[in-house]
Image (tube, rainbow, N blue to C red):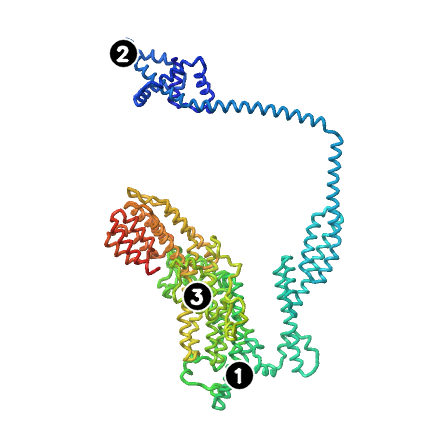
Amino acid sequence: MTIVFRIYALFILKQGLKSPPESLGDLGAIESLRVPGKVLIYEEFRELREQPSDPQAEQELINSIEQVYFSTDSFDIVKYELEKLPSVLNLQELEEYRDKLKQQQAAVSKKVADLILEKQPAYVKELERVTSLQTGLQLAAVICTNGRRHLNIAKEGFTQASLGLLANQRKRQLLIGLLKSLRTIKTLQRTDVRLSEMLEEEDYPGAIQLCLECQKAASTFKHYSCISELNSKLQDTLEQIEEQLDVALSKICKNFDINHYTKVQQAYRLLGKTQTAMDQLHMHFTQAIHNTVFQVVLGYVELCAGNTDTKFQKLQYKDLCTDVQLKVKTYLLGTDLSIFKYDDFIFVLDIISRLMQVGEEFCGSKSEVLQESIRKQSVNYFKNYHRTRLDELRMFLENETWELCPVKSNFSILQLHEFKFMEQSRSPSVSPSKQPASTSSKTVTLFEQYCSGGNPFEIQANHKDEETEDVLASNGYESDEQEKSAYQEYDSDSDVPEELKRDYVDEQTGDAPVKSISRETLKSRKKSDYSLNKVNAPILTNTTLNVIRLVGKYMQMMNILKPIAFDVIHFMSQLFDYYLYAIYTFFGRNDSLESTGLGLSSSRLRTTLNRIQESLIDLEVSADPTATLTAAEERKEKVPSPHLSHLVVLTSGDTLYGLAERVVATESLVFLAEQFEFLQPHLDAVMPAVKKPFLQQFYSQTVSTASELRKPIYWIVAGKAIDYEQMLLLMANVKWDVKEIMSQHNIYVDALLKEFEQFNRKLNDVSKRVRIPLPVSNILWEHCIRLANRTIVEGYANVKKCSNEGRALMQLDFQQFLMKLEKLTDIRPIPDKEFVETYIKAYYLTENDMERWIKEHREYSTKQLTNLVNVCLGSHINKKARQKLLAAIDDIDRPKR
């Protein structure tokens, strides 16, 4: 065998024989074995392969071949072997070396023979594929030749007549399209007649639909000159239809027809002006009501005037009302009190109360029949008035966007017009608790009070129109100078202004700081208190202010007519109940989060909400025609559940799921509760003794629960602000069965801390819009930390394998988390810190201690306890002990099921 073939065989042995498609050079080399000139080599390979051999010995021979023989470079084997010969030749050594080379050659030759024979079927198969491919290419060449020949024949046979036929066909198609366009144009020009007919039939939706379709078609054919004017004409027609729609809408006010109204609304919907329709309908109703009422009042005025003078018709409605004679009011007082405005009713009732007191003191006896009549009339009037106010409150709540109402930091409800009666007595019937101390022990009669002068019927308070309310502020500050001074730097020895000092009153105890707050103290408090961006003005909305004003009006009624005090206070409590229920419905109801148990509201709050829903909220969509008269009357006393305005978005993570709106809503409720607590002594003074338990129950079970709404409302934000699920996924990728104690914490800790840092930044962003009180920020941080710690425990409970070193790694991770977290918040102690640490340390308990530990720590879920036994303790307790512990867990879980 030649040296070249030996080298080639060694190369194949080293690199492995390639498949036939990879190298045509290899294919040529192998093919050479099949030609007649190489039959001898092929037969030699077969003989070598058929010889008995030891594979292990042959492999050792191949491995003993020098590496240089496997080189693919140009390598001269003869030269290499000659250079290796020693200067003094030894025949025996040369023969031994020659025998060694022959053995290596034989081993290589046999290996090559095996490889060649092994690859021979693949080579034959590939050769057949190449032959088939060559045949296919020859056939393709024949097909292409024939195709070109036929194309040439078609080209030569194409005549001018054929081209003419095609041209005529094209012209025919164009004329057909033109005819279709002309028919459409003809139809468009006849549209006016059809539109007029539809308007006469009051088919407004059909007319608008036809007009819009014509406009669309006209825009398609606008390149025709006859259509250009039609488009503007259609627009004028559409405007004319809209004017007729407005006229049709005005007819609904006095003669409502459901079919007619449906057509009008469908027409406005087609125009995309449903809001315009509602605005116009309100305007028409207002105008119709004004005209009708004007005619009614005008009739009374002319009747009382006793002549047919037409000068009254030229008066404005307000002036016309002031011209109604007193005898008309007196007549109405005994039959239909709802005609009075509330302030006028209070005025008349105040005068009647004074008259009754004068008569009682003059005659020495009370007219109980008259008092009972006035009480019934007042209660009926007040019940209707209260029902209207509840409906208005629902409307305000449903349109409230929960933006701050900017009031001054020293705002007090006593600054409002409705509470001026609490500062100065408007009538002798004022509450005894508000009388001067010198007169509280002795009753002073009207005659004694005015014996030296004066008139009991003089209005002692200033007129409302002459009073001014200075309660609103710009951007939460009374002046620009105060806003500038609120943020200036202070020396450590200087006192902080009262506006900023209010921010640091202990909101748990109500105590103010003993020492003045320095600049360093302000900086140290910035982590948890997001109040420094605004003066500590009350957080309330326009709706809250309206409710407070209503409370003042109700108390005026109660102050003048004490016999109806219970009814008034009952209605006042409904105002607070409905406001509280609305805040909970809008921002606090979330069954999926409450099911976890952590954000669950207190039993007292749940009882209060259930009571409000049963007694005040109308959950039915429409009245049942088969209902009894009693059920219908009960429904009249209820109000439909309010709905959150669509302008309030609570689903955006960038705004912390509407945190600003949640803060304004919740803290406005807390503020309203504080005002009710402020008014409690006054209400208690006028409340009848037999009804005082109702008042005490209202304050203890309803007013005091307002602040408890913070927990479920802010729990929803905390549950979404941090990506707890992502943390569980990161924890699932951690290897806890490590064999050495780690010095570096895992990345899920950094990811969680980054989430908290982002949460802190978003809180700062929200605080630029709305002041976040310290209790609110504390609750938010507490909820987030509590959820994070419980998620950490849940992540540890998902571990499949864990070692002692892995449990130490858990402690390292949690300590790292606590260390970094304490730099972000001032919450101390960290909520649920022991919840995590106790779970980690339970790994080291013995069997007996573990059984007692399971019974004592029922705060952990069955899954968490089971994982602790199976995974964490499985390494140092036997199977029997493990089964005993699992049985103890099952006993704890059984009562829950």
Query: Mark 1 or mark 3, which is nearer the start of the sequence?
Result: 1
Lower sequence index among marks 1 and 2: 2
Which callout, 3 or 2, points at the residue further toward the start of the chain? 2
For residue 177, the mark is none
Residue 93, numbered circle: 2
Q: Position of residue 823 (x, y in %)?
A: 36, 52
Residue 670: numbered disc: 3
Q: Relative to 608, is 449 above or below?
A: below
Q: Residues within 10 Å of mark 2 (few under 14, many from 20)?
A: few
Q: If the image is split into quadrants, where does the C terminus sit?
A: bottom left
| Label 1, label 2: how far apart the Cα atoms are | 146 Å
Q: Which residue is mark 1?
A: 352
Where is residue 142 drawn, in percent x and y? 60, 23
Quadrant that contains the N terminus: top left
Q: Nearer the viewer, residue 292 or 48?
A: 48
Q: Position of 98 compared to 222: left or right? A: left
**Location of residue 308 in the rendering, given as x and y in whole percent from the top left corner:** 70, 81
What amino acid type is highlighted by mark number 3? Val
- Tell me which residue sits at (52%, 24%) in the image: 132
Mark 2: secondary structure: helix
Q: Visible in this render: residue 500? A: yes
Q: Quadrant of residue 100?
A: top left
Q: Residue 269: x percent and y percent?
A: 63, 58
Is the residue marked by circle 3 packed among few (<14), some (14-19), or many (20+) residues within 10 Å? Answer: many
The furthest residue to the bottom? 363
Is 688 above or below relative to 577?
A: below
Is 874 left or right of 219, judged from the image as shown? left
